Image (tube, rainbow, N blue to C red):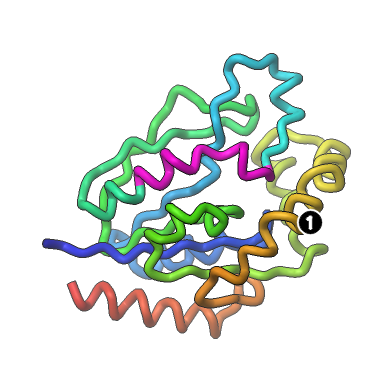
């Protein structure tokens, strides 16, 4: 039976998790699949758009962890899954899906993935990307304005009202569950260490 190695990459919003995950994907191409926890935010179609904009997306309650854990479990069993696609401009899930096929290495990327025990138990390696708060807010602002249709004032308001307090309350404490803490998503030394581990897993297949 083919085996699959699951890596969970956590850390604050804008910490460089996706950068780190994508660097691994680029290094190993078709041997790595990435599952983004961002796509598992709960659908909000029943709410008016203005109300959806006010949802606290940095709380664990905003994420359908059960579905994410089920998808990772099925990938680990060798099955293809239909991943939802979240539309951040509309603040709800879109009608699209992404088919994700099982690969020797599967990376799960998300700010709160280490908080959910059922999901945490599926990870063979747990990584926490720890980045300075000033750098995180600048990255988040750039991403939300360029990719998610937000304006600067709304980004700052959201950061102060939910992102920062939720980071301190929920995200930062999950460091204790990590196997590796990386300082910054562009840390080349840490990247080379994880890359070596991934290479050994792929070569073992």
Q: Is residue 79 left or right of residue 193?
A: left
Residue at 42% from the left image edge and 70% from the top image edge: 125
Helix, strand, or loop for circle 1? Answer: helix
Q: Is residue 95 left or right of residue 42?
A: left
Give the extent of the magenta segment. Answer: 58-71
Residue at 62% from the left image edge and 62% from the top image edge: 11
The residue at the far left in this view is 1
Residue 7, percent from left and from top: 42, 65
Residue 1, percent from left and from top: 11, 62
Q: Is residue 180 left or right of residue 90?
A: left
Q: Quadrant of the C terminus?
A: bottom left
Tell me where residue 68 sits by quadrant.
Answer: top left
Residue 68 sits inside the magenta stretch: yes
The residue at the far front in this view is 117
Q: Is residue 13 above or below residue 97?
A: below
Residue 20, percent from left and from top: 53, 66
Count of all numbered marks drawn on residues in the image: 1
Local packing at callout 1 (Cα closer than 10 Å; few below 14, some 14-19, many 20+) is few
Q: Is residue 129 above or below residue 152?
A: below
Residue 188, percent from left and from top: 56, 80
Tell me where residue 45 sits by quadrant.
Answer: top right
Q: Is residue 169 above or below residue 181?
A: above
Q: Main secondary structure of the magenta part?
A: helix
Residue at 81% from the left image edge and 47% from the top image edge: 159
**148, 110: nearer the viewer:** 110
**62, 34: nearer the viewer:** 62
Residue located beneath label 1 in the image = 138
Residue 42 sits inside the magenta stretch: no
Q: Is residue 42 above or below residue 1?
A: above
Residue at 28% from the left image edge and 50% from the top image edge: 75
């Amino acid at each position: 039976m083919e085996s699959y190695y699951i890596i969970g990459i956590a850390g604050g919003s804008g910490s460089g998790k996706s950068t780190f995950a994508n660097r691994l994907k680029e290094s190993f191409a078709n041997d790595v699949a990435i599952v983004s926890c961002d796509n598992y935010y709960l659908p909000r179609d029943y709410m008016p758009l203005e109300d959806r904009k006010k949802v606290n997306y940095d709380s664990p309650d905003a994420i359908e962890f059960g579905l994410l854990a089920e998808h990772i479990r099925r990938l680990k069993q060798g099955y293809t899954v239909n991943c939802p696609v979240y539309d951040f401009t509309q603040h709800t899930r879109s009608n699209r899906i992404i088919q994700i096929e099982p690969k020797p290495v599967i990376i799960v990327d998300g700010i709160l993935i280490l908080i959910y025990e059922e999901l945490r138990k599926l990870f063979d390696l747990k990584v926490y990307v720890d980045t300075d708060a000033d750098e995180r807010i600048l990255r988040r602002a750039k991403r939300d304005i360029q990719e998610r249709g937000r304006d600067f004032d709304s980004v700052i308001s959201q950061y102060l009202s939910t992102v920062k307090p939720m980071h301190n309350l929920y995200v930062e404490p999950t460091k204790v569950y990590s196997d590796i803490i990386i300082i910054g998503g562009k840390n080349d030394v840490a990247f080379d260490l994880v890359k070596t581990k991934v290479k050994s897993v792929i070569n073992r297949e």
